[in-house]
């Protein structure tokens, strides 16, 4: 199936499932689309068991979609820019210390806790998976997904400071997580020369290089926006930042996701208020809100129907279910240790550790990284573990984090943060 037909099917299904959810189910849009997608996929599988010959066609369609390329080289740049565009930079700077620590040391600590814990758990279950692949799984499942997090936070009603911590961490932790993932994948496949120097250079190129590049293209776009007053042109300039900027970041081997976050923050704060008229700002906001909604719908649909592309195994499924409390425990320990140390110098909202733990959702980025692992000894196992945890994270954590936040809301209003 060619690209145009794939896009047509995905947009049509997203619209149809959104309608069904809106009229009859009433879940948050993204979660509702994913649930319906999963149910339809399970119905297709059940039909195949009963002898109805549609499973093969459905599997061919789903496998014809390159999830990793679609997300990491396509939708991600738009979604990160759209999310960063509406994050208040002043609020972000007030929370810079916890955000920096959670998105760096927190991710690395979680990677090793999950990786080592997975190795022991799988050995106990009689499943043989090398430690390096367990660590690779830890790296891809540790970062919180900015797309899933921002989608859920819109209706969670979190205090501003807490919302900024969760959103800020999710926007910035991808840079560290991708570097760790690339290093571990290189070790696992033996495809790269790994040393302290090469790891440091990779981090500088990806994370620091991506941030500086994002600042540069954001500033150039700001100067262009400030020199004109035409909303059609200004929308096109922001679109060029995302599409051209992300492509150029990949060519320069710097972090495209971090570049989009920094550019989005710069344009969303400095550019929107000093480079746009009120009329233009309204059109730019509406355009990126619509892009965000459409691509979120497509992404969560892809997560839902990806069930058809996974080689299911009872042992892997059991391990995936048992890994859910392990990943939550690692998240709790990494968040708790960082917040615990920082509490000596600054106050935090009541329940902040529990909320950051439960609100640290995993999503499409983890699935995309799992799918990027070359076919071989560990890909199917890791993909199954990842999918199970992502589905739990979005369905169970995503639907209940709002209630958890509200349970601490009264205390939060009496605590400065």
Image: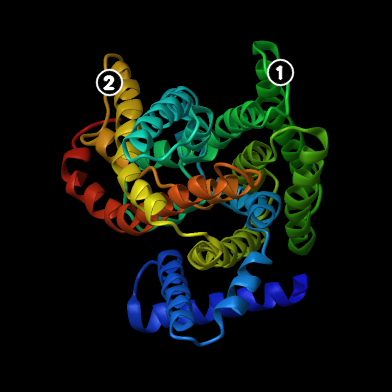
- Give the residue at x 43% y 48%: 385
From the viewer's side, name the closer residue of 354 and 134.
134
Left or right side of 356 for 271: right
Q: Position of residue 254 (x, y in %)?
A: 74, 32
Q: Compute the Cα span from label 1 to label 2.
A: 31 Å
Q: Residue pushed farthest front?
A: 126
Secondary element at tag 1: helix
| 35 lies above or below 19 | above
Residue assigned mark 1? 201
Asked if residue 150 shows in the view, the reply is no
Secondary element at tag 2: helix
Quadrant where the N terminus sits is bottom right
- Badge 1, how many Cα within 10 Å: few under 14, some, many 20+? few
Q: Position of residue 201 (x, y in %)?
A: 71, 18
Q: Position of residue 261 (x, y in %)?
A: 61, 40
- Badge 2, how many Cα within 10 Å: few under 14, some, many 20+? few
- Give the residue at x 76% y 70%: 3
| 378 lies above or below 298 | above
Disc sitting over residue 340 in the figure? 2
């Amino acid at each position: 199936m060619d690209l145009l037909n794939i896009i047509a099917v995905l947009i049509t299904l997203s619209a149809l499932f959104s309608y069904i959810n809106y009229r009859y189910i009433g879940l948050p849009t993204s979660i509702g689309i994913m649930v319906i997608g999963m149910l339809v996929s399970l119905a297709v599988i059940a039909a195949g068991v009963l002898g109805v010959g549609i499973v093969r066609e459905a599997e061919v369609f789903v496998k014809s979609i390159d999830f990793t390329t679609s997300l990491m080289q396509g939708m991600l740049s738009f979604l990160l820019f759209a999310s960063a565009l509406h994050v208040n930079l002043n609020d972000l700077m007030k929370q810079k210390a916890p955000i920096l620590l959670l998105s760096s040391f927190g991710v690395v600590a979680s990677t090793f806790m999950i990786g080592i814990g997975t190795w022991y758990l799988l050995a106990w279950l009689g499943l043989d998976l090398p430690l390096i692949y367990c660590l690779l799984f830890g790296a891809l499942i540790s970062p919180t997904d900015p797309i899933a997090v921002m989608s859920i936070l819109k209706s969670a009603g979190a205090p501003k400071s807490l919302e900024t911590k969760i959103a800020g961490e999710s926007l910035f932790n991808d840079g560290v997580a991708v570097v760790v993932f690339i290093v571990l994948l290189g070790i696992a496949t033996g495809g790269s020369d790994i040393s302290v120097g090469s790891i440091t250079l990779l981090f500088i190129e990806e994370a620091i290089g991506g941030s500086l590049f994002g600042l540069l293209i954001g500033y150039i776009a700001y100067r262009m926006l400030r020199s004109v007053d035409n909303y059609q042109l200004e929308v096109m300039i922001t679109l060029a930042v995302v599409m051209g900027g992300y492509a150029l970041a990949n060519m320069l081997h710097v972090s495209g996701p971090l570049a989009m976050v920094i550019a989005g923050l710069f344009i969303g704060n400095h550019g929107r208020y000093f480079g746009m008229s009120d009329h233009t700002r309204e059109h730019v906001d509406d355009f990126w809100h619509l892009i965000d909604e459409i691509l979120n719908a497509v992404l969560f649909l892809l997560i839902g129907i990806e069930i058809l592309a996974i080689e299911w195994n009872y042992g892997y499924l059991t391990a995936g279910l048992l890994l859910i409390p392990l990943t939550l425990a690692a998240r709790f320990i990494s968040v708790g240790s960082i917040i615990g140390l920082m509490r000596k110098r600054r106050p935090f909202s009541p329940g902040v550790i529990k909320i950051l733990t439960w609100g640290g959702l995993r999503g499409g980025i983890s699935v995309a990284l799992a799918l990027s692992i070359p076919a071989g000894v560990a890909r199917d196992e890791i993909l199954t573990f990842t999918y199970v945890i992502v589905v739990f994270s979005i369905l169970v954590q995503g639907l209940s984090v709002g209630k958890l936040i509200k349970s601490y809301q009264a205390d939060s209003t009496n605590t400065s943060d």
